[in-house]
Image: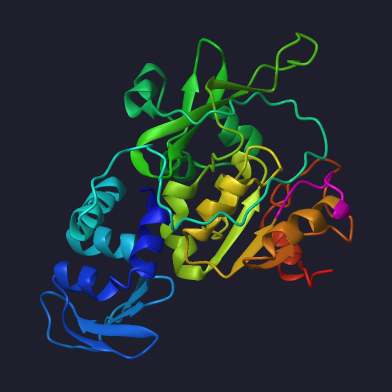
Amino acid sequence: MNAYELKQYIINNDLTDVVIEKLGFHKIKDYGHEYRCALPDDTDSSQVVVKKDNLYCIIYRTNDAFKGDIIDLIIEIKNVDFIKSILILHDIIGIEYEFNKKSNSKNKKDHLSLMKSIRSKSRQYDYEDKTYDMSILDNYISHPTYYLLKEQGIGVKAQEYFSIHYDSFRERVLYPYFDTDNNNMLSGIMGRTTIKGFESLGLPKYFPIAKVSKKSALFGMMQNRRDINATGKVLIFEAENSVLKSWQMGYKYSLALGHHEITNEHIKKLLSLNISEVIIAFDKDISEEFLKETAKKLNKYFNVSYIKDEYDLLGKKDSPVDKGYKVFNFLYKHRVNYKGE
């Protein structure tokens, strides 16, 4: 099972109390819509809250509060990585973990449908999900790239946080897409050319070094997952650079599609997070009609808003973050709440 299926299985089979007890939490009390309990090394039974309907967890501490889902909780208390936490959950509920195997559960229901394509794309993708070992990045330069520093204003910390690499042979900045079910694997690598006048040379602006799935890949989900769960919001951009820029601005709950079509697979992954609002932050050249169609698709499951440049603050093809913090903060505060049709 992937993260979404695993959480739904625990919720649907009323196994939440079993899971937290086997994780070492004790003094468990049932408050109807949530469980409260004590940490494995503590006696305060009000310190930990686990919501029954979505497995959202809070640990109240004197210095700061932990917020995240059950997977984040395991990562926190066991000091393990994402895939290890998934393995721990499988072991607790007695189900064998098989990476990338499709679930055959008879109880699984898919109420999602594909959104029709609105316009043609120039990027190249693979419609089949593939994964790649992290060692593929060893073939490229891991130091921060001058192009992002000078041309995009993206600093060293952001580049390091998102594992940006550089392909000196192809002269491309590389954006690794981490697999959402195993953060020791990649689901692809997108390369952005740094060659001046690439159009006249017949070179594509974007080219996948390792094929990226258009239907399911989400850039930044592994790195920003904790902040997304903690805020209950997710900003969805088109381009990878927008995620890096927003992260620098303090908006650390963003993802990028690498394009602007949200699929049912993307929605499934969003449903695996503890979010109540999705904020669409597509580029200026995306029509409001398309924004509303996208919002309508998401509105079945989340509160949805979208950024609209009503005051013409952006360039024709700019991302909402391309003009800096003040402009983006203004656009963010004045985003349009989708009311449905």
Q: Where is residue 327 in the image (x, y as percent from the top left)?
A: 75, 59
Residue 284 located within the stretch drawn in magenta: yes
Residue 121 located within the stretch drawn in magenta: no
Locate residue 164 relative to residue 88 in the image: left or right.
right
- Extent of the magenta region: 281-289
Above or below 17: residue 244: above
Principal SS element in the magenta part?
loop
Q: Where is residue 300 in the image (x, y as percent from the top left)?
A: 67, 65
Q: Where is residue 5 in the image (x, y as percent from the top left)?
A: 41, 54
- Which residue is located at x 29 percent, y 46 percent? 83
- Which residue is located at x 17 percent, y 88 percent? 44
- Which residue is located at x 28 percent, y 70 percent? 15
Locate residue 109 relative to residue 261 in the image: left or right.
left
Instruction: Using the rendered view, name the quadrant where residue 116 is placed.
Output: top right
- In depth, the one of 337 and 227 nearer the eye is 337
Of all residues, the one furthest to the front in this rendering is: 106
Above or below 86: residue 337: below
Instruction: Using the rendered view, name the quadrant where residue 249 is placed.
Output: bottom right
